[in-house]
């Protein structure tokens, strides 16, 4: 690719540039622990050149900037209140590219566990006698409300993958988020299979891209990066059954990080 | 070349001496299993290993490697990257040795692969005879890979307190002379070697119910066999079977720019025909979308197509794919089932 072509791609992706020619980037959050934005800040430890590649105009967690003139919006968090939708739609209208940052935004993550429970019980449990003061509805990923152009999966996101997604956006390519299971990266690392050590692992149906970090350190994958597009769920259920899990246990493994995928807005 | 004898107590010194001049890969314990990894201490090497998780091909075709660097600042230029160093693979089993022969043919055909071949050129192989099967999944006897008389530079056989050393190449001869003090085999050593080998053969079982030479013709009439749908139902498409396979060599190529977009690196990484996206092409079409078709593809590669292309079956009977499969897809059972159904009266 020539320098001109690269420049052309950049132009195409981020037409509304600051005077220095860098795409303007903003970070926003909804229901989340903000750990993914923290990982973005953390990624500057090893990729300080991120700051040369883009101009950050809004990043509440890390800076006093609050600009609303941006090209790329990274949005962390799930949508859990009707009034969140309005703000998200406003971000969507402004952004040329909207990226779901992390599992809460991408899949609903653990926030969607509440969708498995009766609404009144959840409201009372969380807000007690003042439940009526708070407007809340079933947790959902950003894509349930607006069009999402790209995702950075994971709880939290993987620092290196975040940088790869940024690079892809800079050159105008589809971000290289894998659609194959964690087993691939686990095998490439030469790890002992978690199942061969008597453990439980969601790796065979979970989206790779994390470098199989949990199995590499001896823990089974819990599915935080979401389920691949075409999982063989029946076969996976048999694997978990053979490993000694009950039907309820198996459901728990499939819903801990992926409840929205399993039940949508559920009982709400 | 004459048979030599290497006393076992000399092996650590030999490895240490080799480590000074070569990157030495050997089998090491990894949790309850074993892995081929670079050795940093001769004591780490476990020549008593049964089988490694990944085959020692990792030393020749790494799971990921840089193959080129692009400069995009002020014009365009590209330079190849060859990250190669003098290497010794110590303790390779003969199934993997046979697999290496197939990789050599594959990477030399049509468009010789500079990265693999340069690494191969700079790598010496010290193999070791297996005196018992790894476990119930190995079927090296059926595939004729349970021993080898070529493909190595040096080949060790455990005769008790020493290894006999078969010298396969001049490079092996030179290596042995420089890094070890092996003595010529005496009559007693030869007798001991023959005893050890005679005791070996009956320990291994045939697991294919027919001669492996029949595989290509057997599969030729099995393209529409119902077994592929069965395997497709069970397959997780996790790619573990191909990633652990010593003869699989498919890779993907990925270009990754740096953040300044002034430089980019071209990486290649192992790929797997079992993955959903492997056969997806630019239009979005996926010409091997069904898991059944992907499993059939793998079995045909192992039992027919690689043989037709390179004159060697693509399966060496190591059993790694069987051990790795969480849903118990078993290449031996598959081939046996096809054979049984085609010979049923």
Image: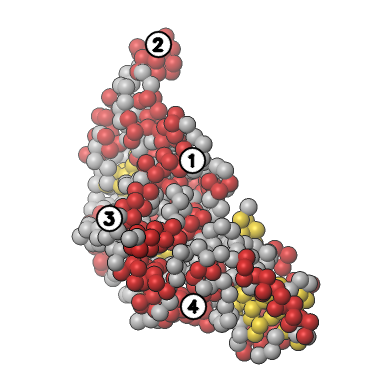
Looking at the picture, tell me which residue is in the foreground, A47 or B247. Answer: B247
Q: Nearer the viewer, mark 1 or mark 3?
A: 1
Percent across and percent down for residue A98 are 29, 44
Callout 2–callout 1 Cβ contact below 8 Å: no
Host chain of mark 3: B
Q: Nearer the viewer, mark 2 or mark 1?
A: 1
Kindly identify the residue that appears in the image at 76 percent across and 75 percent down. B162
Q: Which mark is residue A130?
A: 2
Looking at the picture, tell me which residue is in the foreground, B136 or A28. Answer: B136
- Determine the secondary structure under disc 1: helix
Looking at the picture, tell me which residue is in the foreground, B262 or B41. Answer: B41
- The residue to which callout 1 is attached is A242
- Determine the secondary structure under disc 3: loop
Label 2 to label 1, Cα distance in Å? 46 Å
Label 2 to label 3, Cα distance in Å? 53 Å
Q: Which mark is residue B101?
A: 4
Kindly identify the residue that appears in the image at 49 percent across and 40 percent down. A242
Kindly identify the residue that appears in the image at 30 percent across and 55 percent down. B226
Kindly identify the residue that appears in the image at 43 percent across and 64 percent down. B270
Q: Nearer the viewer, mark 4 or mark 1?
A: 1
- The residue to which callout 3 is attached is B289
Q: Are marks 4 and 3 on the same chain?
A: yes
The relative height of residue B139 versus residue A200 in the rendered view (above or below) is: below
């Amino acid at each position: 690719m020539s320098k001109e072509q690269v420049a052309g791609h950049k132009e195409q992706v981020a037409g509304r540039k600051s005077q220095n020619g860098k795409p303007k980037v903003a970070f926003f959050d909804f229901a989340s622990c903000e750990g993914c934005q923290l990982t973005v800040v953390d990624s500057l430890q090893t990729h300080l050149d991120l700051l040369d590649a883009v101009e950050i105009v809004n990043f509440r967690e890390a800076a006093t900037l609050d600009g609303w003139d941006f090209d790329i919006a990274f949005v962390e968090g799930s949508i859990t209140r009707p009034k969140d939708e309005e703000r998200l739609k406003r971000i969507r209208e402004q952004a040329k590219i909207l990226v779901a940052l992390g599992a809460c935004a991408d899949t609903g993550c653990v926030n969607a566990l509440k969708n498995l429970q009766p609404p009144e019980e959840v409201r009372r449990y969380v807000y007690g006698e003042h439940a009526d003061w708070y407007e809340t509805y079933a947790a959902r990923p950003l894509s349930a409300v607006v069009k999402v152009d790209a995702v950075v999966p994971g709880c939290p996101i993987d620092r290196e993958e975040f940088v790869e997604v940024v690079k892809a956006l800079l050159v105008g390519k589809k971000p290289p988020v894998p659609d194959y299971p964690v087993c691939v990266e686990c095998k490439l690392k030469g790890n002992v299979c978690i199942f061969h050590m008597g453990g439980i692992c969601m790796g065979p149906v979970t989206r790779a891209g994390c470098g199989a970090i949990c199995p590499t350190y001896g823990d089974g994958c819990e599915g935080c990066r979401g389920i691949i597009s075409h999982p063989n769920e029946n076969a996976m259920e048999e694997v978990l059954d053979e490993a000694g899990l009950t039907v309820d246990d198996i459901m728990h493994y499939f819903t801990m990080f992926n409840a929205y995928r399993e039940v949508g807005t559920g009982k709400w | 070349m004459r048979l030599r004898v290497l006393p076992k107590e000399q092996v650590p010194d030999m490895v240490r001496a080799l480590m000074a001049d070569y990157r030495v890969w050997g089998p090491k314990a990894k949790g309850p299993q074993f892995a081929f990894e670079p050795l940093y201490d001769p004591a780490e090497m476990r020549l008593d290993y049964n089988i490694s998780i990944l085959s020692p091909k990792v030393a020749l075709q790494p799971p990921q490697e840089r193959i080129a660097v692009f400069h995009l600042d002020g014009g365009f230029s590209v330079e190849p990257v060859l990250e190669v160093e003098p290497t010794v693979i110590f303790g390779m089993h003969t199934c993997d040795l046979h697999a290496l022969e197939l990789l050599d043919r594959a990477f030399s055909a049509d468009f010789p692969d500079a990265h693999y071949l340069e690494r191969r050129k700079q790598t010496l192989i010290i193999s070791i005879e297996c005196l018992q099967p790894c476990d119930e999944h190995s079927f090296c006897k059926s595939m004729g890979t349970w021993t080898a008389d070529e493909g190595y530079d040096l080949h060790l056989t455990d005769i008790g307190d020493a290894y006999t050393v078969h010298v396969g190449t001049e490079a092996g001869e030179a290596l042995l002379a420089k890094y070890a003090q092996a003595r010529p085999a005496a009559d007693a050593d030869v007798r001991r070697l023959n005893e050890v080998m005679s005791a070996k053969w009956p320990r291994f079982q045939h697991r294919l119910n027919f001669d492996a030479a029949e595989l290509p013709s057997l599969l030729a009439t099995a393209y529409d066999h119902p077994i592929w749908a069965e395997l497709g139902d069970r397959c997780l498409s996790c790619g573990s079977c191909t990633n652990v396979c010593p003869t699989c060599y498919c890779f993907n190529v990925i270009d990754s720019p740096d953040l300044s977009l002034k430089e980019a690196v071209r990486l290649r990484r192992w790929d797997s025909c079992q993955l959903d996206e492997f056969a997806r092409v630019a239009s979005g079409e996926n010409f091997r979308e069904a898991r059944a078709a992907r499993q059939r593809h793998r079995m045909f590669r192992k039992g027919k197509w690689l043989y037709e292309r390179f004159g060697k079956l693509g399966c060496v009977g190591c059993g790694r794919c069987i051990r790795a499969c969480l849903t118990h897809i078993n290449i031996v059972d598959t081939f046996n089932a096809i054979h049984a159904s085609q010979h049923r009266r």
